[in-house]
Image (cartoon, helix red, strand yellow):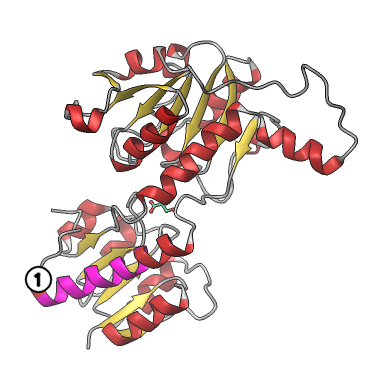
Amino acid sequence: MKKILITRKLLRTCEDKAKETFEANFNLNDELYSQKKLIELSAGQDGILSSLTDKLDSDTIKKLPDTIKIISNFAVGFGNIDLEAAKNRGIAVTNTPDVLTDATAEIGVLLILGACRRAAEGIDSAKEGGWKWSADYLIGKQLTGARLGILGMGRIGQKIAKVAKSLGMVIHYHNRSKLSADKEDGATYHDNLKDLLSVSDVLSVCCPASKETVDMINKDTIEYLPKGAVVTNVARGDIIEDEALIDALNRRKVYAVGLDVYKNEPNLNPGYLKHKSAFILPHLGSATKETRTAMANLAIDNIDEFFKTGNCKNKVNR
Ligand code: DGY
């Protein structure tokens, strides 16, 4: 049986499956392993089942033992792993696409609703009590008729578009390439970021983090947004330059933000905390029982497939 280091606790049924599939080395206390500890614990292991909280950068990957042949990431995103470094060491990296599309899109829609309809302020007021209803109390932005700009129209972007369309939003998107009419489903394609931002009353960031997308939403590109736009991010914190977005909130260039992901999680930029119009969540994208179960099972299956066939359909470092 192959020996696999599982860096974080999984749901019980998934740990049972892991035990049946390989000799699993579990993290019983669910502690966050340092890079040094990850390297130490990898000794004698054939693979690692990692999570997005493990920073497998180039230096860490260089120091992994030769026995490690696969890093199976328990996430669709893999910005926590240096793919090139893994490739140079002959280590396959896999992810868990598809199974988290619905759950993550649900949070994407929640961010849009929460930010536009001032949910953070509403929750605070309801808990404080004593709020006084009036015709102009906590007036927000109506979604019906508003233009939603989707940056990255992959599986999650398409699902958000579908729900937003049913709420009466008008969908625009920017992607590396234009989608087929079937996948576009009436959305308007923009072949550059500037054009997308200039029509985005609400922006939903859904693209993966990569060298090309880091800080794509920055002090210059924010200026392309209409005044009073809403910015939401369900993808990765690295795509947004926090200081620029916080500054845009301060100057009311941006009306509200809805964020589930941050640079340097869990230590988000404190500038967001000062803003009542920041609707912020602690990276809940895939957090449902069904989805976390499906993700862990897929991460296990990816390892199994790799050792059985020498390849894996969800390999991301070709
Ligand atoms: C992912 O898998 O990349 C999600 O962000 C997890 O919630």
Q: Nearer the viewer, residue 21 or 237?
A: 21
* Of 158 and 208, the residue lying toward us: 158
Q: 284 above or below 172?
A: below
Query: Would you say residue 172 is visible in this rendering?
Result: yes
Query: Residue 190 appears at what percent x and percent y?
Result: 27, 18
| x and y, in percent, of residue 196 in the image | 35, 17
Q: Please tell me how crowded label 1 is: few (under 14), some (14-19), or many (20+) other residues with Cα within 10 Å.
A: few
Q: Main secondary structure of the magenta part?
A: helix
Q: Position of residue 39 (x, y in %)?
A: 36, 72
Q: Is residue 207 visible?
A: no
Is 299 part of what is drawn in magenta? yes
Q: Quadrant of the N terminus?
A: bottom left
Q: Is residue 194 above or below residue 300?
A: above
Looking at the rendering, the stretch of residues picked out in magenta corresponds to 295-308
Residue sitting at the far right: 130
Residue 208 occupies quadrant? top left
Up/down of 267 relative to 310, above or below: above
How far across and how far down the image is residue 144, in percent? 51, 21
Q: Which residue is mark 1?
A: 310
Disc 1 on helix, strand or loop?
A: loop
Q: Is residue 276 left or right of residue 54?
A: right
- From this viewpoint, which residue is outermost toward the left? 309
Name the kind of residue labelled 1 in the image: Gly
